[in-house]
Amino acid sequence: MPADRSRPPRRPSRVAGFVVVAVLLGLAGWIAADLRPPEPLAVDAPAEQFSAGRAFAHVEEIATGVRVPGSAATDRVVDDLVDTLSALGLDTRVQNAVGAVRTASGETRMARVQNVVGVLPGADSTGRIFLTAHHDSVETGPGAADDAAGVAAVLESVRALTAGPLLRNDVVVVLTDAEEACSCGAEAFVDSHPLAAAGGVVLNLEARGTRGPPIMFETSSGNAGLAEAYAAAAPHPVATSFAVEVYRAMPNFTDFSVFLADGGFTGLNTAFIDGAAGYHTPQDVPERLDRGSLQAMGDNALATARALGNADLTALARPEADDATYFPVLGELVRYPGRLVWPVAGGALAAVALLVLVVARRGISSLRRTIVGTLLAAVPLVLAPLAAQGTWLLLVAIRPGYGQLLDPWRPGWFRLACVAVVATVVLTWFALLRRRVGAVPLVVGGLVWLAALAGVLAAVAPGGSYLAAWPALAGALTGLLAAATPSRVVRLLAALVGGAVAVAVLAPTVVLFLPALGLSSAAAPAAVAALLLVALLPALDLLFPDETEHRPRAVAAVPAAVLGLAVACTGAGLAVDRFDATHPVPSRLAYVLDAGTGQASWVSTEGSPGDWTAGYVGSRFELPVDYPYLGGDVWSGRAEAADLAPADVETVSDTLVGGRRELTVRVTPQRSGVRVVVLDLRVDGGTVVGARIGGRAVPEEELGGDRVWIVFHAPPEDGLQASVSLEGGGAAELRVIDVSDGLAGLPGFEPRPDGVDAAGAHSTDVVLVAGTTPLG
Ligand SMILES: [Zn+2]
């Protein structure tokens, strides 16, 4: 063997290094661009295709204003939806029902709902496909994206389906009510609609923003077959099994959760999530909706419905043993069965272990130095997310309105800045240590962390293991190649190939995770970006002068350049993203009146009140009695009592039956526009053993104590009837809080100035009036 065996491989020129890094940056840019939604098709697109132009006409018809359950706007939209589906030949009915849901926080919410349900029968059905979206909006905005866009995508998809050959399976369209209130429409459908009884495959369309690629982010468990069907069918598949893991760990709740909780359904949940600043706000108007997002969502829904519509649904409508791993790579979904997660992670661990041994044997980095490098490689992985989060805190300090936002209105420059901050941390760390510790121990140390993370994720969140496993495996194998030969070309190629794999696997997650969590939670996407940069160290090392040369300026220039980029991007972001009438600062203000004491308050749930809100509230404390949406510490200020009557409580009957007190009351709001009634019933020392409200039994979990708290949406105009069975105890009292929308006309209220608007929250722009009635 030649004598130079133990020498480190010769170093390629820095120019070649710049070329390699430029190619990798170009690849990352291509990947980011490729994730963008397609151009929307016009209204005259071929009949069998999905046209965002045609769908957008539905959005404009639906999203003319707020559509809360029980409202006149909802009645109108429900009629229109029935007409549209009926005209397409679907047998379409309105399901009038009361839904009841227990939230993750243990609150019982109920709503009187109107679901629109239409059936397109199949030629030889093996099961049912449910196309679902919600037609209601939040009370704070018209919900053009959330979820008029989903409804429109369903309508236009069904139109395209009816323009083509008959499908094999039944397609059931379910346009639900009251998703924003409590997912009570979906609950009522699943609970009592005959078409739900046999279950099936649900394709749910949602939005958590106004633009961006629709992401298939949530699945039923055992998703292998459905993920495969989706990947094969969807023309713009943006999906990652990592999102499924993240979502399963979060307390979020949509209609899809209700279908899954039932146990009889499998399915896929899709949403576009960028443009979160407009989410649930008055700014979620049709003009803000990205028609490309609508096109992509519709294209995917239509193609998936066609594929599943002609498949044998027997197996797909049941959970399988396996969750698939899948992720986007340049317009395709790479996917493999969950049983391969451990072999891939194990392969990464084995390859990195082999690399550690080979560099030690070849004298490139001793075992001890590799251990030191590994310990030091933890530093940027911890510091980079902190630096990214710190950058956001700095932005909030500069522009306090950001404190109310999940993500800025125009986050583009800030996202680049976030990645540049991560790169600054990684490159500064590398620049400081590479001469002292050596580049190879640091590079290998980074791979050790990636491989270890692949193993940990394989155990706790298998759908996310790929993120660390493939970059570690590619980094280790190309590292072995580079260590095996002194060839500069091979070393360049190794850095290029290992880096390209890391970019292909991790860059889409950085690009999708930034809008998913928003810059207000920049630490999480920054952690993924830090993993990517650590995986890119073999390529980034080529930007630096040879380790043996003492050229501190050339070394410092690399992180300094990236720091300059971070500062420039931050400055550009601040210049571009200013608050104005259509990009307002969100604010939260509610009005609370206790009719018993005549005391009124302004209340805000803002973390630290903005200028406008501070004009109403000045002190922070917990409200002395419970109000919906205003739990915990809030900001409050004294308000003038308005002439607002509390709901009337009339005892309909009060009898003793077999030792139980059976009590029926009718609660009738006395002011117009009451959207929600909260019933807070207490019985001194007794037990509430049963309750029916609005004709629907209250969930058992609410019962068994001396108090029930039920939030009921869309109470009937002639009053809400509530019957309770009480065991033991003495006096009972019913506190009723009724909720209406809009603060205009209240004494002392001044409308917001331009550039300030209502936040997308249940706790703002509501009037709550409480009254207590003793019940015998
Ligand atoms: Zn929604």
Image (cartoon, grey):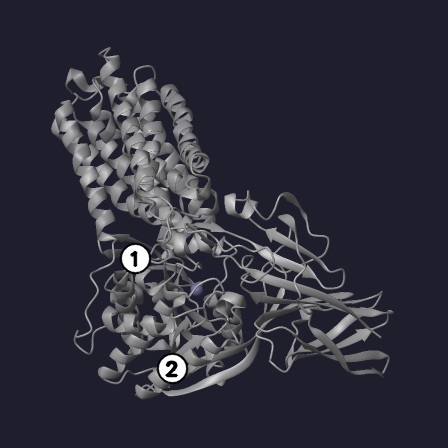
Quadrant of the rendered structure where residue 545 is?
A: top left
Task: List x then y, in percent, for residue 440.
Answer: 29, 23
196 sits to left or right of 29? right
Looking at the image, is 199 positioned above or below residue 336? below
* Label 1 neighbour load within 10 Å: few <14, some 14-19, many 20+: many
Q: Is mark 1 on a helix, strand or loop?
A: loop
**Residue identifier under label 2:** 80
Residue at position x 22%, y 40% from top? 500
**Considering depth in this image, is 366 or 734 the residue closer to the camera?**
734
User: Which image quarter is the C terminus in?
Assistant: bottom right
Task: List x then y, in percent, for residue 413.
Answer: 30, 40
Quadrant of the rendered structure where residue 22 is?
A: top left
Please name the amino acid that badge 1 sits on. Answer: Pro
**Considering depth in this image, is 620 or 343 the residue closer to the camera?**
620
**Considering depth in this image, is 735 or 498 the residue closer to the camera?**
735
**Residue identifier under label 1:** 213
Mark 2 and mark 1: Cα distance apart in space: 28 Å
Q: Is mark 2 on a helix, strand or loop?
A: helix
Task: List x then y, in percent, for residue 418.
Answer: 35, 37
Please name the amino acid that badge 2 sits on. Answer: Asp
316 sits to left or right of 687? left
